[in-house]
Image (spheres, rainbow, N blue to C red):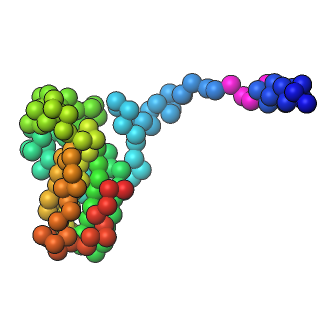
Amino acid sequence: MRALIVAFAVLAAACTPPAQAPSEETAATEGQAGQAAQAPDPERDAMVDALSAQAGVEIGLPVTFEVTTKRVEGEWGWLVAQPWTREGAQIDWSTTRYAQRAADGVLDGGGTTYALLRKQNGTWSVVAFAVGPTDVAYADWPQRYGAPASIMTAN
């Protein structure tokens, strides 16, 4: 019986194609510094543009975001996103207004950002956002801003 199991394992290994290195085409579809390319989404892009403008001022350098969660309900929008430099590199938090929080280990998720947005007259604007909170910073946003709580979950 053991010989049969060993023979089966050897046969399976022999029939498995070797792993291939990523092609240039695959590498070209990925963003810089490991940031994955995201499919086109004009609404998400408009939301990210609004958030990038405000968060860049708060963080202290121009940023963009890789969105991990996007929800829209009526005029309200919700993003959970990771900030990156405009060049697509990871942020060196020691050069930002969040340097002390990063040094103290209280910048959760590498700066994961939670943002509530509102669309008025066809334009998204940021109502509130939190960068790398150590708690559920958005817990009172439904009551404070009148937004639907159903869209505000981490993922």
**Residue 115 place in picture, x, y as percent:** 21, 56
Which residue does the image show at 39% across and 52% down from the upper left?
Answer: 40
Which residue does the image show at 12% across and 50% down from the upper left?
Answer: 54
- Quadrant assignment, res 140: bottom left
Q: Main secondary structure of the magenta part?
A: loop
Instruction: Choose between 127 and 50: the one closer to the eye.
Output: 127
Q: Is residue 103 left or right of residue 3?
A: left
**Residue 4 place in picture, x, y as percent:** 90, 29
Magenta highlight on residue 17: yes
Above or below residue 69? Residue 85 is above
Quadrant for the N terminus, please. Answer: top right
- Quadrant assignment, res 145: bottom left
Quadrant for the C terminus, please. Answer: bottom left
Residue 146 visible in the shown view? yes
How many marks on residues? 0
**Residue 96 place in picture, x, y as percent:** 11, 33
Above or below residue 151? Residue 86 is above
Residue 15 visible in the shown view? no
Which residue does the image show at 34% across and 30% down from the upper left?
Answer: 33
Q: Is residue 110 left or right of residue 6?
A: left
Extent of the magenta region: 14-18
Above or below residue 58? Residue 153 is below
**Residue 41 place in picture, x, y as percent:** 36, 56
Which residue does the image show at 51% across and 32% down from the upper left?
Answer: 25
